[in-house]
Image (cartoon, grey):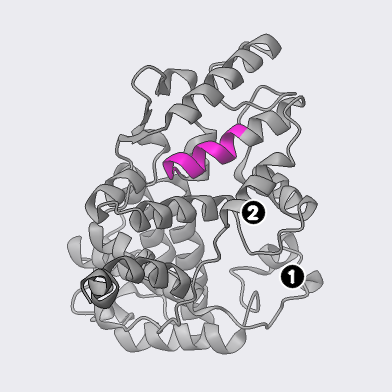
Amino acid sequence: MPKISKNKKSIDDVIVDYLEFCSYKNLTIKTIKSYHQTLMLFSQYLKEEKEIDDIKKITKEIVEEYIQFTKDRGKSSFTYTEEGSKKANIDKRTHIGKEVSNGTLNNYLRNIKAFASYLEEKNISKNTRIHECKFVKIERKAKEQLTDEEYKKLIKCLDCSKFHEFRDYTVINLIFDTGMRLSETLHLTINDIDIVRRIILIPADITKGRKDRVVFFSINMTKLLQRWLKFKDTMQENELLFPTQRTNGIISNPNFERNFRGYLKKTNINKAITPHGLRNNFARRFLLNGGNLLILSKILGHSSVTVTEKAYLDLQDEDLRKKYQKYSPLENMKNKY
């Protein structure tokens, strides 16, 4: 059977090759799924709107048109197949046609740019200039923070006599104390914890960057972890640090996030705080207490210090005001008048 040359491959075939390449590079399943969704929708657009099935015909201008097309059409108004529309219950969704956020549009463009880099690297398509496409400008909004009083109120509402609430109580405190991602925290095993040295080794296979990382926890957190481990071990034998009670498996991010929303509602904390927001709270407090940006970047597992800088430019005015008071020239000179 003759081999199919690269020139004869459809766009969808090349996308599949790219996804295999991503898997070979050990990218996370979440990242690969994101690439798949973005690129298959883009492929369908090329076929239906542009009548293009030749990878070499994709240009910077076409990508820009696609981003604008997606922005104009709105949410869920364009799907890969009719069958996909039925499975997604498109006809029942109330957000159809609503505005797509600039952040989402930038994610689409970022994924397409990554694909374009692959095309050039493999000599499949050259001089597309797709990397020149400009990202949509995003107006930064300050992340909502929990005050000390709100945090204490939040954790006090959990009933630690119940397995799942004691587990969630420990998870919330651990993220707040270490800055770990929710997914990393929920996938930890007891072997990842060094109680004596107060260190957690996060294995590469559960980190976003696919690299081993070390984070640290406090003396107070040590006591809480010891108490949780004793409680857990009396209930079940499991290598997972935070298993589900019924199945002894890993609690999913969506299920934990649902529990977290319930705790916020229970305490009447009307802020857009998520478990990931606890990580943001950790980072903010670390910086405001004089923490080094480079060290924070390593703790958070960011790919570079630049990523950390961009993520935490939005320290609230109140935070800046408090920090300023410490360094005010006149305030520091007041005893000299």
Q: Is residue 157 magenta?
A: no
In the image, the segment drawn in magenta is 170-180
| Whether residue 142 is visible | yes
Contact check, label 1 and label 2, Cβ < 8 Å? no
Q: What residue is disc 2 on? A: 150
Q: Is residue 171 magenta?
A: yes
* Position of the C terminus by quadrant: bottom left
Image coordinates for residue 75, horizontal then vertical, percent: 63, 77
**In the visual, does 109 lie left or right of 73?**
left
Q: Which residue shows up at 64% across the image and 17% down it?
A: 232
Q: Which residue shows up at 64% across the image and 35% down it?
A: 169
Looking at the image, is 69 positioned above or below residue 173?
Answer: below
Image coordinates for residue 86, horizontal then vertical, percent: 75, 64
Q: Main secondary structure of the magenta part?
A: helix
The disc label shown at residue 90, or none: 1
Q: Identity of the amino acid at label 2?
A: Glu
Mark 1 crowdedness (10 Å alpha carbons): few <14, some 14-19, many ≥20: some
Give the SS element for disc 1.
helix
